[in-house]
Image (tube, coloured by chain):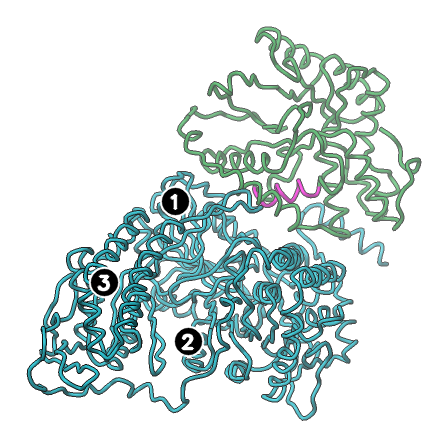
Chain colours: A green, B cyan
Amino acid sequence: MSAHQQGTELDLSWISKIQVNKPAVLRRAEQIQARRPVKKEWQAAWLLKAVTCIDLTTLSGDDTASNIQRLCYKAKYPIREDLLKALNMHDKGITTAAVCVYPARVCDAVRALKAAGCDIPVASVATGFPAAQTHLKTRLEEIRLAVEDGATEIDVVINRTLVLTGQWKGSDFIKTSTGKETVNATFPVAIVMLRAIRDFFWKTGNKVGFKPAGGIRSAKDSLVWLSLIKEELGDEWMKPELFRIGASTLLADIERQIYHHVTGRYAAYHDLPMS
Amino acid sequence: MAATRTASRACEIFTTLEYGPAPESHACALAWLDTQDRHLGHYVNGQWLKPEHRSSVPCQDPITGENLASCLQAQSEDVAAAVEAARASLENWSTQPGAIRAQHLTRLAKVIQKHQRLLWTLESLVTGRAVREVRDRDVPLAQQLLQYHAVQAHTQEEALAGWEPMGVIGLILSPTFPFLDMMWRICPALAVGCTVVVLVPPASPTPLLLAQLAGELGPFPGILNVISGPASLGPVLAAQPGVQKVAFCGAIEEGRALRRTLAGWVPELGLALGAESLLLLTEVADVDSAVEGIVDAAWSDRSPGGLRLLIQEAVWDETMRRLQERMGRLRCGHGLDGAVDMGARGAAARDLAQRYVSEAQSQGAQVFQAGSEPSDSPFFPPTLVSDLPPASPCTQAEVPWPLVVASPFRTAKEALAVANGTPRGGSASVWSERLGQALELAYGLQVGTVWINAHGLRDPAVPMGGCKESGSSWHGGQDGLYEYLRPSGTPAWIPYLSKTLNYDAFGLALPSTLPAGPETGPAPPYGLFVGGRFQAPGARSSRPIRDSQGSLQGYVAEGGAKDIRGAVEAAHQAAPGWMSQSPAARAALLWALAAALQRREPNLVSRLERHGVELKVAKAEVELSVKRLRAWGARVQAQGCALQVAELRGPVLRLREPLGVLAIVCPDEWPLLAFVSLLAPALAHGNTVVLVPSGACPIPALEVCQEMATLLPAGLVNVVTGDRDHLTRCLALHQDIQALWYFGSAQIRPQA
């Protein structure tokens, strides 16, 4: 992740001036899914780009050191080596953007990644994930402990009580939701957020990143997300520094698609290593 | 080798993240053309018609110029054959129960669904439009149209009792309009029991394919016939015996020419003209969404025309920035590429756009184009024109595809003035998050359709049409059905105009009238009834009116062009007040007038008697006139707005608006009843009227005017007496009259 936001004076008139027409945004969201198909080698290249933007995530109550280790290994080798070789991408350092775990598992992840010999950052959800309805003091302590353990990126769940009462705070990255809600990353919501990011950039010159999380499972979805970023923000946002996809099962589908692109055959489940 | 190239390509794309081609295979379109040996004829009576000794035109891929097929050009005999087929199948088709027609339309919808790939690739291939638009919008909408109208056919006997199909319908399509425009018109026509002959421009295979799909369904082969030929065959089609209505969609100039040629020849002409649209962006709008609306309207291969864009000054800079940024992301390319926003439309459309751009530039406008195309390229880039001086000729001209002409406005009032300041009145959209403002602007726009915070949404259940020069025909919904229906029992229409009528000389000369001696009996009211009072005519002369015995009944004023001008002006002044009256108030006035007529009955009866009408008949005429006024007064209450909810994520408000100033030329027969019967519906619907009463017997009408002077607001009804032909000419040449109802010896269509 790049240098932190310098921040800017809070000007609530920016927010009060925003107009969002919901039916129009819904129409745009429908359009964007049908207007930019990406095929053949373009699809393969875009899927690899999507891989490098994934925050490979496990946020389960039963996470242990062993499945964290497996996850970290998959983060380092997200696509089978021979497939990458066929695309001549084996020496381009294709890894996922980060590994994302609960604070208590940060140690395990850091250790596993060190053992695998790579510098993929460890991201941790913190601050009373996913509801954030705990005391400020414990939430700050949680962040401090996670950083102490070696996490370099923190997914902060904002206190929505403050938001709903109009007390906003700034951020380096904004995320659609925790991924644990009933509705998570949807295109209409993303469109509104991306437009806000662009407006903020035009006003201040600061680039805020964007991370959709939850429910992104298919390779096709990831392509739509990338084209959404390209259409609304432009190429400069299509990189892990400014765009992340929070996902756990997405990677498997991408790998299957790349397998198909390279071999012309659809993979059986046992053809590809699990994460 | 191939593998390596692919590999290096992927590596490169990984860095640039560009879009690649996403071609749709059009093999099936070519295969279909092969079934016709790449040689298309006409589809008539369920089979291909390929007469010999006809010239043919090539059907070309507009992007590569590759010859795809050759298409026969129809001649008069082919048109006659098609109309004959439609006529022959009319009897059978129109007498089928609605349920059977519904079933047939449903089957056609299913066939389209089954062969949609063929449809969309063929259409995109030959028109050059983006396949995404044809595939995701046109083809599904075509199916929905068939299904919607199947339901209408099913319920026709109940819902449309008292109405019958008109008969054979001629439909003329102009080259810029996609096959969907044909569907909007043939679906309602077929549903209500009409049969159709469609004249499509040369080299348009999609309508032929549709006709084939419909024809192969079996039992009713002749209900849809498609012939391809030049626009000059339009009048030939219209003049065929049995054709009861001609529907046309195309350019304004073509429509006007057709109207002139067909005056008196076709009972009904439904025009849908021009393709320009308007987008009004206020300062309280979701600007990003509005920018998408602009893309939908002009740069997504949806509309065949361009867009006039009005932006409120406060958000001008912001909008321009967003718009230009968005334009940079639009993709032009081969229509069959699934990731392309805009295809090519052929040389004619490109040259038209280029001419407009050069003209605008020479008048000092700023032109922004995303990317540049070499002059020999088949593509024309999305283009934004701004700073066009308000008085330049370009501002008045219709904006062609794919141009957007932007101009600023300061207040809502100014926006309406600018928006309504063109002769066109097709469609528009208003973008504002303030409900009150959005509705106010929508009410104020003089166009057929207004979308709020959206542009170009269509649904089969929602009627759409235009006003002013954009034509007055409607398609979609109930209103679309009535375009092809007439009240049961209406006699079939017979052409009544000799081709030799000279429009230039018609009604030009005003015969001079001389004093014819003193009046006998009580003198009738004298003067032209204009602006609520009797006025002396501009010509300061009078014409004698004789009764049935030939003795002088009185003098009426001799009206002329200046009197018409004055009357129209008075009518326009009264229009806003009358329009804003509540239906109840309008009904009350009509009833008051009816009561006044009743009071004056003896007087009116004696006037009619002197004109040679039997006492019994005269009494009946007055009685019936009173009844008519009451009946229309009662019907005022029933009109108003209907609220429909379609699948457009919002409600649809259908408003019935008055036309404005109506001119009515009454027939000679039934001098009082005709006068009242024509006046009453015009007033009931909120119009103001300039009326020429019966030439032979204008006095009863003038008697009624005496009552109207005290009852009605000044200028609401204006009655001008004089020479009928001359007054008709004056009315037709007045551009600010919204409609002209003419009953009489010859046909002069309004030029307005």
Residue B609 percent location from the top left of the image: 22, 75
Q: Which mark is residue B439?
A: 1
**Circles 1, 2 touching at the beta carbon (< 8 Å):** no
Quote the CA–CA distance across marks 1 and 2.
Answer: 32 Å
Q: Which residue is mark 3?
A: B717
Q: Residue at x 75, y 48 (%)?
A: A43
Q: Say which quarter of the image contains residue A62.
A: top right
Q: Nearer the viewer, residue B444 or A271?
A: B444
For residue B736, above or below residue A35: below
Q: Say which quarter of the image contains residue A111.
A: top right
Q: Which amino acid type corresponds to the residue marked 1 in the rendered image?
A: Leu
Instruction: Please report, as a chain letter, where disc 2 is located.
Output: B
Q: Which amino acid type corresponds to the residue marked 2 in the rendered image?
A: Arg
Q: Which stretch is magenta?
A: A223-232
Q: Is residue B117 visible?
A: yes
Q: Is residue B84 magenta?
A: no
> For the residues carrying marks 3 and 2, which lies nearer the camera in this image?
3
Quote the CA–CA distance across marks 3 and 1.
Answer: 30 Å
Dot 3 or dot 1: first in sequence order is 1
> For the residues carrying marks 3 and 1, which lies nearer the camera in this image?
3
**B575 on left or right of B488:** left
**Circles 3, 2 touching at the beta carbon (< 8 Å):** no
Quote the CA–CA distance across marks 3 and 2.
Answer: 29 Å
